Image (cartoon, rainbow, N blue to C red):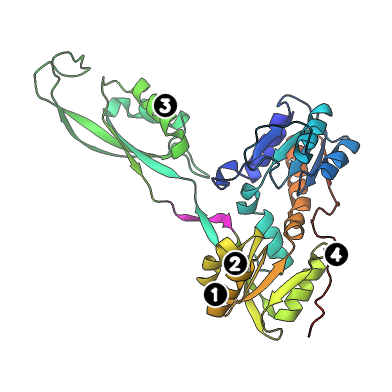
Amino acid sequence: MLAEVVSLLDESFDPSTAEDWDRIGLVTGDPDQPVQRVLFAVDPLPEIVAEAVASDADLLVAHHPLLLRGVHSVAATDAKGRALHQLVKNSCALLTMHTNADAALGGVNDALADAVGMRSERIPLRALPDTAMARIVVHVSAEQTDALIAAMAAAGAGKTAHYDFGAYWTDGTGQFRPLPGAEPAVGKIGALERVQQRRVEMVVPRGRMAAVVHALRTVHPYEEPAFTVVEEAGIPGSRGLGRLGAVSEIRLSDLAKSLSEALPATAHGVRVAGDPDRLIHQVAVCGGAGDSLLDDVAASNADAYVTSDLRHHPATEFRADHDVALLDIAHWAGEWLWLDRAAAVLHEQVLAAGGQIEVQVSRHNTDPWTFSVPGGLA
C-alpha cells in the first residue's frame, strides 16, 4: 500500500529534518492504494508526469515540491494544475522528498560528495541536532517504581538507539501537606507528611513527551504527582545540510573535469572560480542552491566548494574575502545523482519486508537550460 511505501521512505529520509519553509510529503494519492511501480525524478514537471503515466507508475517520487508556494487554484489551466489532474486521473500518487533528502545520511549531499571523491569520514556543513530529547524527573514510592517505569517506557521514555527501559533513580525523603479538598493517597488533611520516595529520571524524545506525561499521571498513585521536565541541549549530529571532507590531492582543474564526467550532461557544465593549478585537499559540497551556506564554508577548512545557483554578488564577495575555489554545477544535475540511490534503498526495504516492487529512475533531463554560447569579446 502507498502508506507503507511512504513509511519506508520516511525511515531513510526523515520528514522531521526538512527545513521549516519546505513543503514535503504526499501531494496526491490514497494511502490505501496499491503500489507496484515507482518512478523517481528531480522535478514533477508535465513531461515527468507523462513519463510516470506512460510507465504505469503508481507513485512518482520527486525531489522538488510541486506546490512549494501557496496556490488558490489547481485548475488545469497551467502546468502545475495539468500535472495534478494527470496524476489524479491516472491514480498515480506524488510524494515529495526535498530538504529531508538533502539532510539524510545517504541522501542528496552524500551522493554529490561521492561524485567529488570525498572520503567516507565526512561531516555536514550545517549539522542538525541529534533527536531532540528531554528528561523527565518524577518522585514515586519504591513499591510503585517498576510499574511507573514500565508505563512510561511503553509511552516512549527511556529509549535510545539500541536500548530501552533506561532509567536512573535515587532514594530520598519527600514532604507535603494535603489541603482541604484534597484526596491524598498518603497522609491526612492538614497534617505535614514525610515519606520515603524515589526520584526517577528517564530520557524522552520531545515528540513523545505528551504521551509519557499522560502515562505517568495514569499510573502514579498520587492525586497530584510531582514531576519536572528538563530540556536537553541539541548535540550536532551526522545529518544536515551540505558535506565537508577530504579528497585525495587533486588540481582544481582536474577536480572540475572529474566532476563534469560524473554528472549528467547539461548546457551549464561546471563553472569554476579559482586557480586551475591549485591543489585541493578538502572539499565542501551542497546539492541545490548553496549560497546560503557560504558562511559555513568560510568557517570550515575547505579548499573548494561545489554547489549550484551561485549568484554574482555573493560569489564575488566571497572570493574577495576567502581563498576558497568555487565550482558551480547545474542544479538538476547535482541532485539527479541521488535518484538511483533512493530507488535502490526503497527496493531493498520492500524486499526485506517480504514484498515486491519495481523502481525506475527518470533519465529525462529537466534542467531548464538547453544550450550555451561562449562570450565573444576578448
What stretch of residues is rendered in magenta? 234-241
- Whether the residues at callouts 1 and 4 have beta carbons within 8 Å, the answer is no
From the image, tell me which residue sits under label 1.
301
Residue wearing tag 3: 151
Identify the residue under disc 4: 371
- What secondary structure characterizes most of the magenta part? strand
The numbered dot on residue 244 is: 2
First along the sequence among labels 3 and 4: 3
Amino acid identity at mark 2: Leu
Q: CA–CA distance between discs 3 and 1?
A: 48 Å
Amino acid type, mark 1: Asn
The residue located at (60%, 60%) in the rendering is 242
Question: Circles 3 and 4: CB distance less than 8 Å?
Answer: no
What is the C-alpha distance between the residues marked 1 and 4?
35 Å
Specify the quadrant of the image occupied by residue 52. Answer: top right
Q: Left of 175 or right of it: where is 374?
A: right
